[in-house]
Image: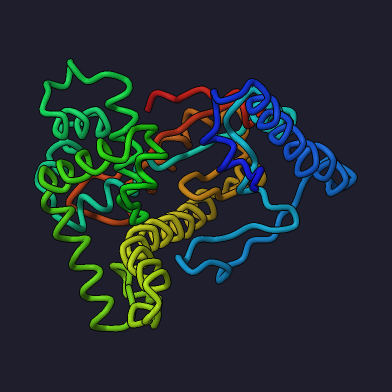
């Protein structure tokens, strides 16, 4: 018998205690992981300092430890309260620059999928567009439920999600999930063909690689164990996409660092944190309007793909109350 969060989620609505147990687990985890531990790790000025690992992940992403500042919660009432404890120094603001839907833009570009490329080029809501295509309805007839399912599948495709996992994530029946996936792969045939090519190439070469040639070797692709083999196939699909995202982010960080030094901002602008698709800066308030467009411009131009790369900027006094900047 399991009381793991994943199993309890499946039982929501079956008994009133399930919601209470899930709530308790969430609060207990937030308290032990953040509220109790982070203050003890701050220096005499109340500042936290993490250590970044260059080679800590198989995809090439940076990882953070002691403390891990890449897993500070962003959602939910209590998650936002914890994030609001991260504040800028007096006279400074926190500036966030974030890649918009970069994984989907990468898969559209690498797969050369004409429909997805056109949707991004037109500035459409990609999840709503996907839902319209799969359900064969106009975009203005897409319901929130349709969009939610399309969003889960758009990201699930990257991680090699199967029918059962998709059904659970999208909260729909297995039969409906299988039909949805089949319709998706029929409509976005470029993506479907690309996924199969990634698996075939990885099996033939023994590794998956990014656009820039960084490899991840996958001997499990030839395993007699079907579970190990299917896991390796999922990695073969995911690694070129998530790995390229990591490469793009690292290139952006290098170029932004060069720009900061060239412009001689000194202590007025510091790159302080990298969290997956987001860069966080501490900047003098009177400089934010000047530097935000430059930072997003650099992020958008480090790599040219068939799909435009987009970055958004937000500013705030703390990491929770961030407002979008019109660039």
- Which quarter of the figure has residue 86? top right
Q: Residue at x 84, y 49 (%)?
A: 41
Who is closer to the viewer here, 233 or 59?
Answer: 233
Q: Residue at x 59, y 37 (%)?
A: 8
Left or right: where 232 falls relative to 317: left
Q: Residue furthest top?
A: 140
- Which quarter of the figure has residue 179? top left
| Residue 217, x across and y down, in percent | 39, 80
Is any atom of residue 301 visible in this view? no
Left or right: where 198 falls relative to 325: left
Q: Residue furthest front?
A: 1
Who is closer to the viewer here, 39 or 32?
Answer: 32
| Residue 138, x across and y down, in percent | 12, 21
Is any atom of residue 68 visible in this view? yes
Whether residue 164 is situated above or below residue 241 in the rendered picture: above
| Residue 228, x across and y down, in percent | 42, 72
| Residue 15, x across and y down, in percent | 61, 24
- Which quarter of the figure has residue 72? top right
Left or right: where 28 falls relative to 277: right
Q: Residue at x 17, y 16 (%)?
A: 140
Quadrant (top left, top right, bottom left, bottom right) of the C terminus: top left
Q: Residue at x 31, y 70 (%)?
A: 212
């Amino acid at each position: 018998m399991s009381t793991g969060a994943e199993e309890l989620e499946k039982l929501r609505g079956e008994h009133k205690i399930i919601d209470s147990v899930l709530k308790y687990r969430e609060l207990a985890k937030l308290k032990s992981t953040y509220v109790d531990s982070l203050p003890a790790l701050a220096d005499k000025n109340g500042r936290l300092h993490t250590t970044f690992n260059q080679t800590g992940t198989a995809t090439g992403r940076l990882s953070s430890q002691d403390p891990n500042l890449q897993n500070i919660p962003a959602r939910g009432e209590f998650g936002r309260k914890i994030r609001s404890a991260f504040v800028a120094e007096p006279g400074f603001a926190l500036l966030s620059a974030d890649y918009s839907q970069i994984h989907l833009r990468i898969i559209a570009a690498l797969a050369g999928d004409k429909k997805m490329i056109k949707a991004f080029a037109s500035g459409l809501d990609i999840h709503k567009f996907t839902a319209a295509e799969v359900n064969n309805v106009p975009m203005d007839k897409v319901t929130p439920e349709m969009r939610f399912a399309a969003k889960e599948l758009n990201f699930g495709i990257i991680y090699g999600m199967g029918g059962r996992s998709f059904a659970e994530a999208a909260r729909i029946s297995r039969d409906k999930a299988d039909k949805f996936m089949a319709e998706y792969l029929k409509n976005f045939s470029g993506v479907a063909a690309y996924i199969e090519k990634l698996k075939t190439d990885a099996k033939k070469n023994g590794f998956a690689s990014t656009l820039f040639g960084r490899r991840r070797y996958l001997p499990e692709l030839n395993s007699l164990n079907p579970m190990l083999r299917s896991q390796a196939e999922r990695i073969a699909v995911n690694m070129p996409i998530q790995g390229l995202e990591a490469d793009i982010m690292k290139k952006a960080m290098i170029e932004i660092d060069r720009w900061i030094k060239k412009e001689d901002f000194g202590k007025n602008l510091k790159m302080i944190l990298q969290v997956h698709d987001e860069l966080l800066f501490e900047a003098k308030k009177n400089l934010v309007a000047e530097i935000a467009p430059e930072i997003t411009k650099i992020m958008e131009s480090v790599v040219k793909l068939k799909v435009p790369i987009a970055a958004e900027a937000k500013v705030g006094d703390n990491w929770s109350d961030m407002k979008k900047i019109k660039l």
